[in-house]
Amino acid sequence: MDKFTVHKGLVAPIDRENVDTDAIIPKQFLKSIRKTGFGPNLFDEWRYLDPGEPGQDPASRKPNPDFVLNQPRYKGATVLLARKNFGCGSSREHAPWALQQYGFRTILAPSFADIFFNNCFKNGLLPIVLPESTISKLFDEVNAFPGYELTVDLERQVIVKPDGSEIAFDVQPFRKYCLLNGFDDIGLTLRQSDKIKAFEAQRLATKPWLAHTLQG
């Protein structure tokens, strides 16, 4: 997965509490066996006026002009500002896939559902927990100033506002290490590839029958 070091991006606000994973990526899109292509259907039922089904051309859809991501001032946003309990509901990993494939790199909220929170880190998306009062102030500033951007510095664990002031945030050291280096679970395992190959070679030398396959 892509490394996360320092990211500066336009902020889009989703001013709703308890946004569940079915709102993030509705259930009908989970039929796909691929891990890609979910970005166009992020927040599908809010983003479009017509029902969405897998395989539709997004250009043929009817966008909802009132939904925040369809408003010109938030086009290209990569920082999502949310309310408490973001990502609740089912444990579908498609939710962080959809957010990331739309273009978001980080989400700021007072709280997240546990499984969604963990899935974000596994897919290179940085969820940041901030006090509710801080989130509310950020909502006010985003609404007041078009083009509002934030810089998220993971190494220093600070968010830099347009006026230069900083907001500190916490992140577990292991998760920070993985994001800074772009390691998902597979990437972490592959760091030990030499040891894995050595083990496999030794096992084959002592148990050569393992190299044989059964004939049907």
Image (cartoon, rainbow, N blue to C red):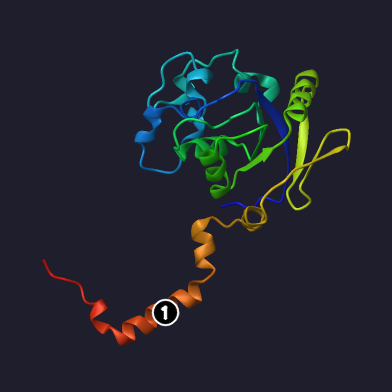
**With 95 as the anchor, is 73 left or right in this view?**
right
At a point 75% along the width and 19% down the height, the residue shown is 143
Residue 62 shows in this picture: yes
**With 61 as the anchor, is 129 left or right in this view?**
right
Give the image location of residue 42, x and y in percent. 51, 29
Indicate whether 155 appears above or below 200.
above
Which element is circle 1 on?
helix
Indicate whether 47 appears above or below 209.
above
**With 144 as the anchor, is 49 left or right in this view?**
left
Give the image location of residue 38, x and y in percent. 47, 35
Q: Nearer the viewer, residue 148 or 170?
A: 170
Task: Work out which residue is located at the far left of the displayed protein and give it.
Answer: 216
Q: Nearer the viewer, residue 89 or 8?
A: 89
For disc 1, the marked residue is: 199
At a point 46% along the width and 18% down the height, the residue shown is 61
At a point 74% along the width and 32% down the height, the residue shown is 131
At a point 35% along the width and 42% down the height, the residue shown is 33
> Which quadrant of the figure has residue 141?
top right
Residue type at mark 1? Phe
Q: Residues within 10 Å of mark 1 (few under 14, many from 20)?
A: few
**With 45 as the anchor, is 76 left or right in this view?**
right
Residue 55 shows in this picture: no
Give the image location of residue 191, x and y in percent. 54, 68
Q: How many marks?
A: 1
> Which quadrant of the figure has residue 72?
top right
Task: Work out which residue is located at the far bottom of the displayed protein and give it.
Answer: 206
Give the image location of residue 84, x and y in percent. 63, 28
Quadrant of the rendering where the C terminus is positioned: bottom left
